Structures are given as C-alpha cells and as structure tokens.
Image (cartoon, rainbow, N blue to C red):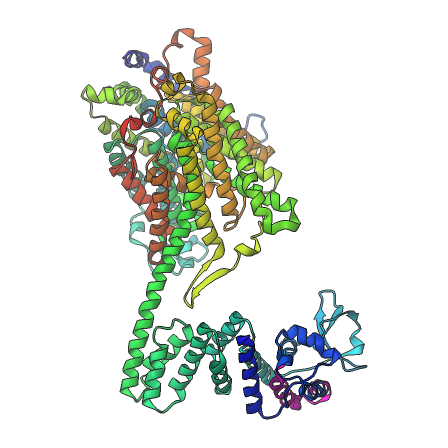
C-alpha cells in the first residue's frame, strides 16, 4: 500500500510540474484492460477526473497518426506526461519502428515482421492478436533520430516509475552513463518518493554526479564527491577520472577530494578483481574436482589406472544430450533425469570394463594402463560413429543461465555457482558412501589388504566391480555438470584426463580430502597465474610445478600413512 | 633370486640375433633401394619413391619403438612421453631445414623463416642462431632432448618416482611441451610447425636419390642403434638394468646405485628417439606440435607391446607391423582403424602379454618358455597388491 501511495504521490507531483493534465478519473470499458495491465491502483486514488484524461489520451493517440513528423515530438511529450502504463509499450514499439496504424479506423498496431514477409498485427492498447494484415491497410508512424534519442530518454524516465524495483534500478543505472540535464528533474522527483533503499542511493548518486559537474558551490561539490566515493559504477569512475586527469579543475580542494575518492574506488576495484579471480579459481577447481573425484576412487582407492576415465565423463555428457533429445518439452527438468541416467550409464560401462578387462590384469598396473587406453580409443570412436564427430548442443536450463550481479564490477555466472555447489555435494556424498556404508567399508578393507579381506568373507571381485562402477558413475555425473559449461564432443574426456591424474597424484593417492584440496588449489593457482602469463602458459607452469613437486614428494600432498600405505 | 639368475643366463648369446637383424635389415634396404633406382618404372619389381619414403618413415618409427623398448622392456620404466624426445629431435632437424630454405620462401626473406615474417618478427630469436650449420643443428637436436631426459630422469629417479607415477609424469611432460609448442610466441611456427623444406645439405629433398639416401641412412642408424643397444644390454650395465627391473630394492641392497643406471639408460633412450625424430622430419617434410601429443607417445608403447618387449627386435617388428596396418586400414576405413587400434591395445595386453615375438618363442621353442621377460610375474601371487606394489 505504501508503494501505491508513493506512486500516486509521484504521479501528482509530476502532473503538477508538467502542468498540463487533469487528474485521471473514472473507468471506461476500453480502459479496464489498460488498467489491468497497469496493475496500479490509480483508480482508487481519484476516480472522478479520469474520464477527461482518458479522452485527452485517446485524442493524443489519434493526433499521433495524423500529424507531421515535426509535430510528433510535442505529442509524445504530452503522452509521456499522462503517465499511463500504455505509454511505455507505445514508446518502445515506436522506437523499434514497429508502430503502425490501421488506415480505416486509426487503430494503433504493433507489427511483427516475420521472416517470410508477412505482417502479424497486435492491437497496441489491448494486446489483442489480429493475425496477418495486408500492407495496404496499414501505415507506419515514422520517427527520426532526434525522436529516437527522446524516446530512449523518455523510456528510462518512465522506467523510473515502474513498480518493480529491478526495473527502476536498471533505469537509473542506464541514466548514469549518459546523465542529461533534462533528466535531472525526473531524477530529483523520483529520489523524493523512492522507497527502495538501494534505488534511492543510486538516484542520489546520479544527482551527486550531476551536481559535481554543474554546481558552483564548493561545499555541494565536495559533498557530491563524498557520495560518489566508494561507488563501483564505471560512470562514476570515468567522471572522477576525467576530472583528475584533465587537471581542468580550478578548485584544488575538489581536485584533491576527487583524487582521494578515485584512489579508494580503484583500490576497491582491484580487491574485487582478486575476489573474481578467486571465484574463477574455485570454479575451475570444482571442475577439476568433479573430473578427478571418480579417478580418486578407481586410481586412488582401487589402484587401477583407468585411462578411459575421461571417456566416462564424456559418456555422462552425452547421456545429458540424449536425455534432452528424449524429452524436448521438459528441458528445465531434464537435468534431474540426466544425473541418474549418466551415473547408471557410465557406471554400467565401468562395471563391464572391470569384468571384461581390468579383472584379468590385476596387479599389472602398466598393462592396465595400456588396455584402458585402448578402451578409451574405442569409446571415443564409438561416440563419433553413433552421434557425429561434431560437438553436440546441450541446452542450459533457464535457472542455470544468467549471472548473479554482486556489484557493478563483480558478477558470477549461475552455472558456475551451481557447479561449485554440485561438486561439493558429490564429494560429500562420496565421502559418506566411503565412510558410512558397508560398501565403503569393504572397499577400504580390500584396498588395504586384499587377502585378509578375502579371508574375512568379503567377495573381493564383487567389491572391485562395484568400486569401479562407482568411480565411473561419478565420472558420468561430472560429465553432466561439464556439459553445461564446455562443448560436448568426442574429445571432451581427453581434455580432462591428464589434469585429473595430476589432481589425484598431487593430492595424494588414496586420499579423497587430498583430492578436494588439490583440485581447488590447482584451480586457484591456474587462475591467478593467468592474467600475468596467459591461459596456456599458466597451464604449463602448473604442470611443471606438479612434475617438480612430485620429485620432492612422490606420494603427493597428503600421503597415506600407517598400515594402508605399506 | 631365481628371476635374477634367469635373466642373467638368458641374454648370453646376442651376437647371433644382432647379425641376423642387421643382415635382414640391410638386404631389405638394399633390395628396395635398387628396385627404386635401377628397375624401370613400368616393371612389376619397381618400388615407387612413395614406398621408399614410407619405408624410411617406418624405420624411424621402429627406432623410436626401440628407444621405448630399451627403457620399458629392459628397465620397466614405462615412458608415455618418448614422443617428446622424438619431436624435439625432429624440431632440431626442422630448424636446420627451415634455415636452408633461405630466400625461397613465400615472403622471400633471406634472414627469417616465413612464419616469423608473418608474425612481424624483426630478427631471428637467439635459439635459432647457428641452426643453419648442419653439424651444430644435429648437435642441438641430440643435446636438447638428451639434456631434458637427463634433468627429468635425474629428478624423477633420484626421488624414486617409479611405476605408474612416472608414466603419468612423462605423459604430463609431453603434454606440457605440446601446449608450449602450440604457442606462436615460442618461435617454432606454432600450430603449423615447420614445413615447406627445400633441401638438405644441398640435395633437393624431392629427388629420388635423396629419398633413397635418407632411407638408407635411416636403416644404417637403426642398425647402429640396434647393435649399440644390444651391446649395452649385454654389458655389465645392461645386467644391472635388468636386475633393477626385476627387483629394484634388491639390487639397491646389493650395492648398485639404481638411479644412476636408470638416468643414463633414460638419456640413451631419449637420444635414440631424437635421432629417429631428426631422420623422420626430412622424409615426411613437416614437424608440428601434434608430434608431442600424448596419444602419439602411447601408440609407440603399443607397437612395442605388440612386437614383444625386452627383445629390441620385437619392438622393431611391432612398429613395422602396426604402422603398415595403419597405412593400409586408415585409408580403407578410417573409422574402423581407430576401433582396431583400440582393440589391439586390449587384445595384446590380455592375450599376448609377451607380444608376437614371445608368442612365437613359446610356440616353437618350448625350452625358453620358463625364462620370461615379464617382470613381477612371480610376485603377484604371493604379495597382496597394495599401493606399494603399484608403485614398484
């Protein structure tokens, strides 16, 4: 209710300053749709005067269709002053060059020109779809560049009155970049009635920026710099930067204050730059962790060198693709089907590989390496033959796309945030399986002393198959996550196999927590090196570092201790 | 202990196999060369220059396989990065050949190779200086891979990095080098590598006689490599190397500095690979970072596994057979070849652990059946395979 009051206050204020309009009043039949679209409660405020305003509005719209181009500006200004919700779509359509009217009854139409040349019409006011119209029955309302400039401006001004906070915020931010004296009055008015604290600060910032340029009073300008200090918006920085750089400022106090403010802002921006790098590092680390965590089971715990591990990731990614192909109408939810599907597919293939090949090579790690490499070649080629050698498109669900804007200089993409969380969840789940379930107990027993475990009644061959299936399945899940951020193609796995081995070896074989630590530290190291060296060189430096590190500590960061290590 | 004695007694009579190998190699080489140069083109016995070049290429790859066999078959060091030494040797030769182009390149720049002109480089980087001298270039083609192998081996073997860890590290090494050579800033032609060679030591690379000569030189180098490797393996050092393969802790306890033997053997093997690479480049006419790809290195290991490791000639046979099959099948059905190669990996490790040579020996001379080249075979049964086992 407070908001409504504020909106109507604003309305009245603007109307009085505009001076032209009578108050809006009663409800005609045609208007009710507009009212619904408007969603505000103007009619509750004062129902009596709306009729005349409505008439005036209709008259203006009629004039718009008849007048000359040179007079359009005046009509648009009057229309803007009416404050109707219908003004914004009207202006937007006009700006897009899609505003037409019907020759017969001067009805305003929004025309959607389709690829095949047909024109689809919608009634601008009611939104009613009128279907295909002939070009002869309609006429375009033309605008020139000057009008376009005005329209853009007016649209941001109108957006300031939107009831959605984010629209208002975007409108102010948009105005910050090209602050015009014409907008100042609107901004001032908006600042007075704004209820949202964030938007209000932004509005005051905009006014401060204006004062810094145009005011003559030292105190006012210093106060303006005070307001601007610590803000991260690029326009603030630019303005201060111009002021400091050009040295055209006569007032030394203002100059000094601006320099100080700029320094503070720059420091903040640098700090957020580090935060961003840290985030990128964590993101890369979570990818590495996801890729390596399955390997940490098969290689780390079981001791099997699985060169086909990357292909398990690839299979997971392709499982996502297939699931999306199978349920094209439910792409948003496909990922919840894809995760178990990828786990099962990759897991079953893993069990199959273990039963058919790896079992026979027990205790011969180098031969296992070769055989699984052969399997990886076969799997890659199979994917090339079944699908195609080209990359496949995996759709990112709506809720995973876009980015989270933390402030003007720092924003993080949702997909990477989700993958980070997902990696930690998978890790926790795996840790739970290894520590709390009987399967985990058996796996650890077999990895520590196979013969002893066997004599205690553990079916070691079954445990082997299950472990390998688990590791492969987790690689498949990693594939689901990776399909959201990289290309899904037959070579997807190859890109990760060496990195995965590095992570596992660096973290210490047989130590899941070590893998977690290694994944994140390598990811962060890589991203912090990148600005200085470039991506490829950063990758090489990290590889060389690990090679050298391995010489010093061949068992990794966290080597296994105690009997299990013997 | 029985293993040690077995291996010691096994490799007593090398002279016979050596001379056999050299005789077969040279008669084949001479026959093929003569058939190319002196038999008329329309004759059924004529060997085309294309075939000669192909054979020369196979011989270089066979030498690379032999280099892998020296470390893997005899010392148990499974290197998945030998392609790196091969490619570095190749780049050494490629740089020399590049300098020989002179002003006949596309940009007719007498000082700079084409790609440097293309990248707007003002002058030759320091590491290209002197590469127009054949002797110096060849020295570099050997010294750089040798030094890399020495540093890598010294670091790795001194800190007792063995088994699978070592394999993965060698793979990371060649992967890192591949990434590095893909960069244009490195000054080795980036993605495209070095190509468009014109002549070597003043001889036109396209001429039949040059091709045949290169083929014969490859055969000679392979023979020298074979005899040298045989000599090393029969010397005292070779026996210690075998002892290290079959039980490194035991040989260390007996007083041998195992890491030194391993380092020198690794360097020797890298040099063999570098020679092979240097001979390979003029025959195929190009060297690019793709040669560093981990897949190439691991393919070499399969040639050795197919032929039979720990025999030297097995590696050569494996390399020739697999590459011949590759040339044939990858033309006939490119997709099928990858399946076949993958299946070959699995099949050989599962059913032919000693390779073709081992299979033939088992089949036709039952008295050597007991003497196996398989390391760790009798240990798998009585010790629990733990991480320790994997690393040894």
Seen at 48% across and 42% down, the residue is A478
Residue B168 place in picture, x, y as percent: 37, 35
> What is the number of callouts on the image?
0
Q: Quadrant of residue A20?
A: bottom right
Which quadrant of the rendered structure holds the N terminus of chain A?
Answer: bottom right
Which range is magenta? A60-84
In the image: residue A494, left or right of residue B311: right
Viewer-closest of B309 and B27: B309
Please give left or right for residue A444 compared with residue A419 in the image.
left
Where is residue A344 shown, x and y percent of the image? 55, 35
Q: Position of residue A439 (x, y in %)?
A: 44, 29
Asked if residue A76 lies in the magenta stretch, the reply is: yes
Give above or below for A286 relative to A261: above
Residue B34 visible in the shown view:
no
In this rendering, the answer to whether A467 lies above or below B141 is above
Q: Is residue B300 magenta?
A: no
Task: Specify the principal SS of the magenta part.
Answer: helix
């Amino acid at each position: 209710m407070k908001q409504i009051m504020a909106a109507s206050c604003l309305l009245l204020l603007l109307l009085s300053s505009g001076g032209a309009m009578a108050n809006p009043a009663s409800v005609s039949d045609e208007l009710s749709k507009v009212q619904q679209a408007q969603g505000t409660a103007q009619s509750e405020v004062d129902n009596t005067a709306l009729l005349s305003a409505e008439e005036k509005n209709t008259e203006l719209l009629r004039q718009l269709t008849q007048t000359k181009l040179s007079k359009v500006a005046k009509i648009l200004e009057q229309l803007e002053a009416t404050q109707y919700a219908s003004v914004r779509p009207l202006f937007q359509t006009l700006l897009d060059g899609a505003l037409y009217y019907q020759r017969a009854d001067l009805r305003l139409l929004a025309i959607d020109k389709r690829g095949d040349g047909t024109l689809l019409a919608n009634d601008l006011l009611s939104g009613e779809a009128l279907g295909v119209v002939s070009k002869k029955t309609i006429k375009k309302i033309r605008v020139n560049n000057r009008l376009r400039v005005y329209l853009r401006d007016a649209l941001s001004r109108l957006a300031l009155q939107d009831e959605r906070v984010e629209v208002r915020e975007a409108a102010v931010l948009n105005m910050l970049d090209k602050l015009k004296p014409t907008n100042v009055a609107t901004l001032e008015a908006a600042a007075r009635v704004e209820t949202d604290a964030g938007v209000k600060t932004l509005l005051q910032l905009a006014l401060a920026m204006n004062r810094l340029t145009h005011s003559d009073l030292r105190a006012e300008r210093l106060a303006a710099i005070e307001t601007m200090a610590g803000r991260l918006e690029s326009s603030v920085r630019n303005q201060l930067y111009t002021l400091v750089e050009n040295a055209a400022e006569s007032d030394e106090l203002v100059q000094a204050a601006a320099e100080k403010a700029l320094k503070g802002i720059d420091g903040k921006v640098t700090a957020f730059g580090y935060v961003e790098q840290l985030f990128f590092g964590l993101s890369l680390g979570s990818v590495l962790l996801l890729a390596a965590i399955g390997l940490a089971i098969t290689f780390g715990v079981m001791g099997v060198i699985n060169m086909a591990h990357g292909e398990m990731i690839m299979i997971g990614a392709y499982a996502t693709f297939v699931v999306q192909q199978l349920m094209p109408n439910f792409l948003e939810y496909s990922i919840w089907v894809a995760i178990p599907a990828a786990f099962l597919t990759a897991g079953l293939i893993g069990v199959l590989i273990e039963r058919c090949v790896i079992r026979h090579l027990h205790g011969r790690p180098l031969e296992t390496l070769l055989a699984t490499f052969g399997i990886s070649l076969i799997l890659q080629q199979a994917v090339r033959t079944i699908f195609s050698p080209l990359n496949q498109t995996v759709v990112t669900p709506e809720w995973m796309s876009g980015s989270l804007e933390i402030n003007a200089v720092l924003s993080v993409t949702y997909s990477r945030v989700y993958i980070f969380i997902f990696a930690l969840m998978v890790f926790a789940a795996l840790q739970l399986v290894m520590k709390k379930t009987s399967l985990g107990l058996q796996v650890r027993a077999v990895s520590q002393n196979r013969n002893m475990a066997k004599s205690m009644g553990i079916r070691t061959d079954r445990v082997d198959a299950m472990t390998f299936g688990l590791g492969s399945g987790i690689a498949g899940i990693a594939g689901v996550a990776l399909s959201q951020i990289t290309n899904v193609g037959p070579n997807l796995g190859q890109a990760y196999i060496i990195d995965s081995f590095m992570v596992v070896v660096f973290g210490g074989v047989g130590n899941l927590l070590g893998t977690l630590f290694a994944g994140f530290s390598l990811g962060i190291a890589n991203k912090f090196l990148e600005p200085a060296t470039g991506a490829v060189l950063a990758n090489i430096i990290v590889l060389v570092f690990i090679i050298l590190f391995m010489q010093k500590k061949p068992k990794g960061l966290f080597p296994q201790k105690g009997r299990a290590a013997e | 202990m029985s293993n040690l004695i077995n291996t010691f007694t096994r490799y007593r009579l090398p002279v016979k196999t050596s001379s056999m190998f050299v005789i077969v190699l040279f008669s084949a080489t001479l026959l093929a060369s003569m058939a190319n140069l002196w038999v008329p083109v329309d004759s059924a016995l004529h060997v085309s220059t294309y075939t000669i070049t192909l054979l020369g290429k196979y011989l270089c790859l066979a030498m690379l396989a032999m280099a892998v066999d020296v470390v893997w078959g005899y010392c148990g060091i499974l290197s998945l990065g030998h392609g790196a030494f091969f490619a570095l040797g190749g780049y050494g030769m490629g740089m020399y050949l590049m300098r020989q182009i002179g002003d006949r390149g596309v940009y007719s720049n007498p000082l700079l190779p084409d790609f440097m002109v293309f990248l707007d480089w003002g002058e030759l980087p320091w590491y290209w200086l002197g590469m127009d001298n054949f002797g110096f270039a060849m020295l570099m083609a050997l010294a750089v891979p040798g030094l890399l192998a020495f540093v890598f081996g010294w670091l790795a073997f001194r800190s007792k990095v063995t088994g699978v860890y070592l394999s993965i590290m060698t793979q990371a090494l060649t992967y890192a080098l591949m990434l590095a050579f893909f960069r244009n800033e490195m000054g080795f032609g980036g993605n495209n590598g070095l190509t468009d060679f014109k002549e070597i030591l003043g001889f036109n690379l396209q001429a039949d006689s040059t091709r045949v000569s290169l083929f014969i030189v490859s055969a000679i180098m392979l023979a020298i490599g074979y005899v040298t490797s045989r000599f090393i393996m029969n010397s005292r050092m070779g026996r210690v190397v075998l002892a290290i393969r079959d039980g490194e802790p035991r040989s260390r306890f007996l007083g041998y500095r195992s890491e030194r033997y391993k380092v020198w053997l690794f360097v020797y093997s890298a040099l063999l690979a570098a020679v092979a690479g240097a001979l390979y480049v003029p025959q195929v006419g190009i060297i690019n970072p793709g040669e560093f790809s981990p897949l190439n290195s691991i393919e070499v290991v399969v040639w050795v596994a197919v032929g039979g490791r720990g025999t030297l000639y097995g590696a050569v046979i494996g390399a020739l057979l697999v590459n011949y099959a590759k040339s044939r099948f990858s033309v006939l059905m490119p997709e099928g070849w990858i399946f076949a190669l993958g299946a070959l990996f699995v099949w050989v490790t599962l059913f032919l652990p000693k390779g073709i040579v081992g299979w033939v020996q088992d089949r036709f001379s039952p008295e050597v059946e007991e003497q196996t080249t398989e390391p760790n075979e009798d240990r798998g049964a009585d010790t629990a395979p733990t991480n320790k086992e994997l690393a040894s």
